[in-house]
């Protein structure tokens, strides 16, 4: 697959199926013989998981948006340096549930912080690394929140936000996707998991082949 690996991110609201679909894709790509790193944000390294704990703790009601933004960026900086870049350098396929687009959607579109500032911080945290492919799993927020509620013991600090927050979030992801149609594929996540996965797998295969062909020519 050439020298550098392939970087795939999954984005979307709560309960849209990111964790479910990521795992399945990782298993299939490993079976096909690829080296795979399956990871997630916020988290993915010991330091980033500690930051995640601070971010998602429901008792932290007093957390201001700027603190939240900087902590997400800090967790990402560590994750990119310690795990993602080394794995890509080894030629592996990296699959991350959430990445930089989540910060644009959550802290930007949903919380209302300045987009320019968020892009600037993302640039620092990612060292300019952009996913080769981003899958946005899209579905009505009520359905996603119901799924999340049924599958988790309790909702975390972000999941507990008001419904309007989640609606701005969904619109945010769709806006981001419309601005970068080459990189970002929106998939209807209301369908059953097998049908959602079929679409994801078709897109991933197409994009990996495209990249392989580019290297050969
Ligand atoms: N397409 C789907 N249809 C119905 N339920 C789903 C679907 N995808 C995932 N789920 C279920 O919804 C819940 C949340 O899925 P999960 O993958 O954890 O979402 P996310 O990581 O995006 O929050 C889980 O219980 C999962 O089994
Ligand atoms: Mg998840």
Image: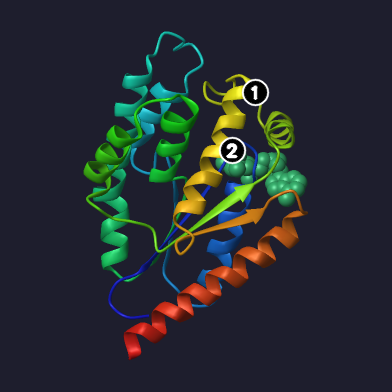
Q: Is residue 195 visible?
A: yes
Q: Quadrant of ligand 1?
A: top right
Residue 208 position, x and y percent, is 46, 75
Residue farthest right in this picture:
192
Which residue is more in the foreground, 138 or 177? 177
Provide the secondary structure element on which disc 1 rests. helix
Residue 130 position, x and y percent, is 33, 56
Q: Give how far apart the Cα atoms at labels 1 and 2 are.
A: 11 Å
Which residue is more in the foreground, 88 or 210? 210
Provide the secondary structure element on which disc 2 rests. helix
What residue is drawn where x is 29% and y is 49%?
80
Residue farthest bottom in this picture:
217
Residue at label 1? Answer: 163
Residue at label 2? Answer: 170
The numbered mark, 1 or 2, whose residue comes first in the sequence reads 1
What residue is drawn where x is 24% and y is 53%?
128
Label 1 crowd bin: few (<14), some (14–19), many (20+), radius 10 Å: few
Mark 2 and ligand 1: say if the CB distance to the nearest ligand atom is below 8 Å: no
**Residue 112, quarter of the rendered image:** top left
What residue is drawn where x is 40% and y is 64%?
132
Question: Exactly how many numbered labels are in the figure?
Answer: 2
| Vertical relation: 137 (above or below) 195 | above
Residue 197 horizontal side relative to residue 168, left or right: right
């Amino acid at each position: 697959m050439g020298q550098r690996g392939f970087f795939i991110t999954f984005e979307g609201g709560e309960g849209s199926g990111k964790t479910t679909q990521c795992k399945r894709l990782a298993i299939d790509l490993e079976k096909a013989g690829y080296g795979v790193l399956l990871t997630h944000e916020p988290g993915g390294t010991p330091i980033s998981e500690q930051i995640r704990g601070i971010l998602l703790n429901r008792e932290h009601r007093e957390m201001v948006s700027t603190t939240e933004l900087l902590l997400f960026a800090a967790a990402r900086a560590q994750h990119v340096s310690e795990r993602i870049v080394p794995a890509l350098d080894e030629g592996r396929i990296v699959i991350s549930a959430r990445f930089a687009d989540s910060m644009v959607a959550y802290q930007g579109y949903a919380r209302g912080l300045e987009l320019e500032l968020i892009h600037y911080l993302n640039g620092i945290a990612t060292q300019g690394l952009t996913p080769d492919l981003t899958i946005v799993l899209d579905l009505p927020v009520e359905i996603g929140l119901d799924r999340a509620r049924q599958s988790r013991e309790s909702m975390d600090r972000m999941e507990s936000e008001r419904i309007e927050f989640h609606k701005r979030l969904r619109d945010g992801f769709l806006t981001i996707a419309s601005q970068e149609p080459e990189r970002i594929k929106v998939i209807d996540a209301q369908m059953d998991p097998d049908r959602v996965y079929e679409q994801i797998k078709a897109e991933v295969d197409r994009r990996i082949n495209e990249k392989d062909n580019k290297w050969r020519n």
